[in-house]
């Protein structure tokens, strides 16, 4: 199946339509992808607005330059491998998702809810996570170098061994987190000192 520059609204899709398909420059509005399989599906330049991906199997998905705006990935899985490259996930949520095999290569994940996710050892370098909800998530040994974490919520997150060098930590409360083994540059150390109540002169 190949779709080019098509628009779909309020439509439910099946795994049979998507598996192995090629989607380019399409727009999907309020579409339902519940329990679909994206095995060997290539998606580029597409926009998904307000779509539902409940329980979707993202293994084998390759998405590049796509926008997932206000989408719900509740219970989605990527246990083996999937790729989101330079994608925009603004306002989307991943409640109860299990995505250890999902590769996140750059992109804008601002205002995204990643609450409680297992993101251990994940490469998130350079990803924009401004105002994202990362509370209760496991970010141990995650690569967050040069990530934009301004105003991100990290309450209860696990950060032991994470690499935060070059990350923008403006407005992030680090004061109650276990930062054992966390790598910081000078700016990060200053942000931490301020979070702990230090007055820098």
Image (cartoon, helix red, strand yellow):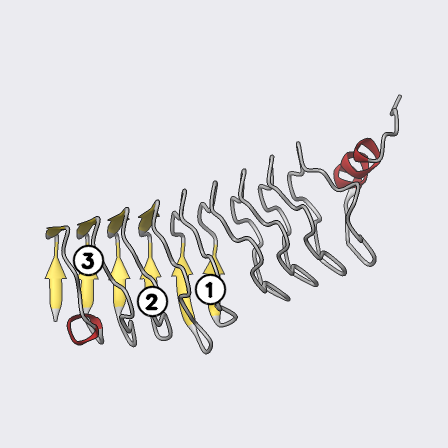
* Image location of residue 144, percent across then percent down: 63, 53
- Quadrant of the frame with the C terminus: top right
Picture quadrant of residue 59: bottom left
Q: Are marks 3 and 1 in contact (CB under 8 Å)?
A: no
Residue 62 - label: 2
Q: Earlier in the sequence, mark 2 or mark 3?
A: 3
- Quadrant of the frame with the N terminus: bottom left
Asked which secondary structure carries label 2, the reply is strand
Residue 97 - label: 1
Q: Is residue 154 above or below residue 15?
A: above
* Image location of residue 2, percent across then percent down: 12, 67
Q: Residue at x 59, y 46 (%)?
A: 147
User: Mark 3, mark 1: which one is toward the viewer?
Assistant: 1
Alpha carbon of mark 1 to alpha carbon of mark 2: how far? Answer: 18 Å
Q: Which residue occupies the extreme top position in the image?
A: 201
Q: Is residue 131 above or below residue 22?
A: above
- Give neighbour class at mark 2: few <14, some 14-19, many 20+ (Cα, 10 Å): many
User: Is 49 left, or right, of 80 in this rendering?
Assistant: left
Q: Earlier in the sequence, mark 3 or mark 1?
A: 3
Q: Are marks 1 and 2 in contact (CB under 8 Å)?
A: no
- Give neighbour class at mark 3: few <14, some 14-19, many 20+ (Cα, 10 Å): many
Asked which secondary structure carries label 3, the reply is strand
Q: Residue at x 69, y 51 (%)?
A: 156
Q: Residue at x 35, y 72 (%)?
A: 57
* Image location of residue 127, percent across then percent down: 52, 49
Q: Earlier in the sequence, mark 1 or mark 2?
A: 2
Q: Are marks 2 and 3 in contact (CB under 8 Å)?
A: no
User: Is 173 left, or right, of 33 in this rendering?
Assistant: right
User: Is 157 left, or right, of 32 in this rendering?
Assistant: right
Residue 24 - label: 3
Alpha carbon of mark 2 to alpha carbon of mark 3: how far? Answer: 12 Å
- Give neighbour class at mark 1: few <14, some 14-19, many 20+ (Cα, 10 Å): many
């Amino acid at each position: 199946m190949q779709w080019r520059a098509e628009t779909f609204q309020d439509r439910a899709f099946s795994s049979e339509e998507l598996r192995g398909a090629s989607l380019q420059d399409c727009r999907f509005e309020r579409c339902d992808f519940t329990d679909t399989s994206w095995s060997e599906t290539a998606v580029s330049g597409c926009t998904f607005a307000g779509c539902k991906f409940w329980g979707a199997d993202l293994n084998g998905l390759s998405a590049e330059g796509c926008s997932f705006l206000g989408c719900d990935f509740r219970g989605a899985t990527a246990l083996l491998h999937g790729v989101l490259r330079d994608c925009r996930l603004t306002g989307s949520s991943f409640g109860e998702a299990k995505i250890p095999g999902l590769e996140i290569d750059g992109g804008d994940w601002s205002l995204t809810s990643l609450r409680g996710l297992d993101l251990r050892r994940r490469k998130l370098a350079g990803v924009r996570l401004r105002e994202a909800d990362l509370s209760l998530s496991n970010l141990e040994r995650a690569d967050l170098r040069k990530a934009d974490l301004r105003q991100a919520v990290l309450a209860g997150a696990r950060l032991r061994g994470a690499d935060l060098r070059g990350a923008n930590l403006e407005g992030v409360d680090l004061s109650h987190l276990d930062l054992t083994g966390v790598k910081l540059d000078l700016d990060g150390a200053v942000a931490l000192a301020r979070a702990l109540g230090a007055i820098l002169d």
